[in-house]
Structures are given as C-alpha cells and as structure tokens.
Amino acid sequence: MYRRWIKRPLDLMVAMIVLLCIWPILVAIALCIVIESCGRGSVLFKQRRIGKDKEEFYIYKFRTMKSDTPKDIPTHLLKNPDAFITRVGKFLRRTSLDELPQIFNILKGEMSFVGPRPALWNQYDLIALRDKNGANRVMPGLTGLAQVKGRDELPIGIKAAYDGRYVRRMGLAFDCFIVVLTVKGVFTAHGIREGEK
C-alpha cells in the first residue's frame, strides 16, 4: 500500500515544500559556480542513469568538476580526482549540496527521496545484481540504505544486497529512518571517498 499509493504523493509534496524553502540556497550555489568558472561551463551536470524498470534518465547535479573531466566514470574511480574537482565543487561534495538539483528529478517522477541510488548506464555488474534482488523494479532514490551503510566504501555486491534489503523492507518508518541516518552522514561526511584506494 505504501509503495503504490503513498510514497509518490508524499515525495511530490515534500519536494515542493523543500524547493520553496531552499531556492535561495540553489541560486547562491549557482552563482558561486558561475563566478569560479568565470561564466564558462554549465551550472548543472547531467548524467545518464538507470531508473525504475531500467529506463534511462538524466540525473541532475550541481557541476563540481572541470569541463574536461572524463564522462561516465564515478569520481572514486578516477586516478587523480583532485585534478578535476573545483574548489567550490569540493565543498559541495563534502556537504552533499551538489545533490540538491535531484529534487527536480523527484518532481519529474524519475526519482524518490529514498531508494537505491541510480546506477550509471554502464555499471552493468551492479545493474545485473539489482535484477536478481528486485531493486530495479522500484524508483531510485536521492538516498538509500546502501548510502547510509557506507556509500563509496561498499563493494558492488554488498551495495546491491543492501538495495535488495531496502526493497523488501520498504515502508514509511524505514524511509524516515534512512533519511535521519542520511542527515547524520552528511554532517560527518561518512563513506565519501574520492579517487582510487
């Protein structure tokens, strides 16, 4: 019942309220990006991701990297990410503020506040593992169980297992629990890793 009738309307209502509250922050971040890059490059970064039922969509983020950064490669897999991340970008990533534009993905019905993080279109191993545990059948999220359990530190197999566990336990109380842990993780920057180990 929650998944079919409550989750989407709740996402929509909360997204509209959040957007009304934080639009000055969005404008301020956009101005900082424009000033640092001297007007060159876009404010937003779009990237192909896999959504519900493996339909592709473009996720939105504030641009945190230079325009010559290799495309479709997770930052933690770059050999020298510091060479590509801007000064403003480092702050946005550390505070997870770069993820705020995904509120528009939620409004468009491409994402939820809580769910498995959308895989890159070329993360075939993760997509295949999610097929096995049913995680590709639900809306991807701004945050999820795998994110509060380790984010970039988790091997793909464990990440997919957490995604499957979320699908099996999905409910309002569990979503609220994940949101609380997400806020805590943002303040501690837990699980964020840039570059290869």
Image (tube, grey):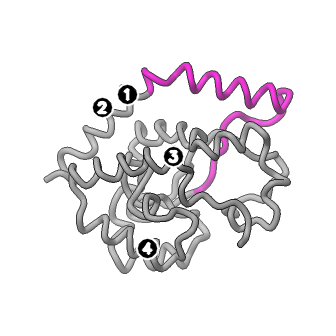
What residue is pinned by disc 2?
13
Mark 3 or mark 2, which is nearer the start of the sequence? 2
The label nearer to you, 2 versus 4, is 4
What residue is pinned by disc 4?
160
- Given the image, on which type of amino acid does mark 2 rest? Met
Which structural element holds mark 2?
A: helix
The label nearer to you, 4 versus 1, is 4
C-beta proximity under 8 Å, tags 4 and 3:
no
Magenta highlight range: 19-48
What residue is pinned by disc 3?
186
Which structural element holds mark 3?
A: helix
Label 4 environment density (alpha carbons within 10 Å; few <14, some 14–19, many ≥20): many
The label nearer to you, 2 versus 3, is 3
Q: Residue at x 73, y 27 (%)?
A: 32
Mark 3 or mark 1, which is nearer the start of the sequence? 1
| Mark 2 → mark 3, Cα distance in angstroms | 23 Å
- Given the image, on which type of amino acid does mark 1 rest? Met
